[in-house]
Amino acid sequence: MFSKILIKLIDEAIVPAILLLVVRLVSVVLLSRHLRIPFTVSNSGFVFNSPEDYIKINSYSMVFMLIALVLGLSYTLVKSFFFHSSHITPKLTTKVFSLKMSSFIQNSFELYSQGAIWVSYLYLLLLVGGIMALFGLVYPWIFYICLGTSVLSSVLFIIDVEKEIRISNMEDNEFDYYEDTEEELILEFGDDYV
Amino acid sequence: MFKHFQKALINSLLVVLLLGILMMPISSMGLMSFRTQEEREVLSVQDTTEKTEENTFIDYEKEEETYLERILREAEESTESTTMQTE
């Protein structure tokens, strides 16, 4: 009855939403304290005494949000490129299992739903940043950084999706199995090891 | 037919929920504002101001009373002077 994709997307969207919200609020307070900019908290949120103070805090707070987004995106991209269940190397698989970090290995459904959410947040930030830069509410360079990050992350995700499509279209006889020339790894799985 | 409608309704509610979650951190960006020049010039009760002639309290009733008294006095003086001239 419920759409599996929608449930998954909602599930994946909660953590980044809370993270970004916390980063925004905490960064506004800490930056105001650090830069000694006074503000009052009223019904309309944080109220600054001058537009210059507002622009400064708004811009740097947006940079912190962008950093949080880039960290989340990088984590997802690293998993997509190196720990994707469809193309993870056998050597890395053994290492991941020996370190008991098998949760790192995820399938396309898990990875692309995470990626779609993080990229959506980045595009929304780009959109809002663009509008704010247009009206002079943030420094214009914030928008250019958002744009660069969005383009770069989109290209990297497209590369991974293309790789995935290529793998899914491959025939069985096209897979190459290489002989492992490096030293042999022996896995020990606790007390069950014989 | 009804089953499909129910499914579509639930899924559209899920879409709304997803969009709401997506918009939540972005809407937090609107939690900031600044005072305009006009707003900054408005005096608040908490503001400390120096007591000058401009902001001293004016008793308009008393001012009106003195003004009327002055007019009456001037009128009386003018009538007195005209009677003296005729005499």
Image: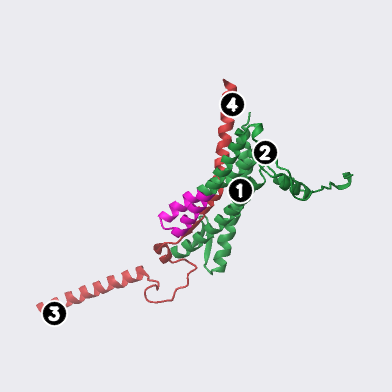
Tag 3 secondary structure:
helix
Question: Residue under circle 1?
Answer: A77
Q: Are marks 1 and 3 on the same chain?
A: no
Is A160 one of the magenta-colored residues?
no
Is A141 one of the magenta-colored residues?
yes
Chain coloured red: which letter? B
- Which quadrant would residue A171 be assigned to in this image? top right
Tag 1 secondary structure:
helix
Of all chains, the one bearing label 2 is: A
Q: How crowded is the residue under tag 2: few (<14 C-alpha within 10 Å), some, or many (20+)?
A: few
Question: Residue under circle 2?
Answer: A176
Colour of the chain lettered A: green
Question: Residue under circle 3?
Answer: B84
Q: Position of residue A152 (x, y in %)?
A: 52, 50
The secondary structure that dominates the magenta segment is helix
Residue lying farthest to the left in this orientation? B86
Q: Position of residue A92 (x, y in %)?
A: 71, 48
Which numbered dot is residue B6? 4
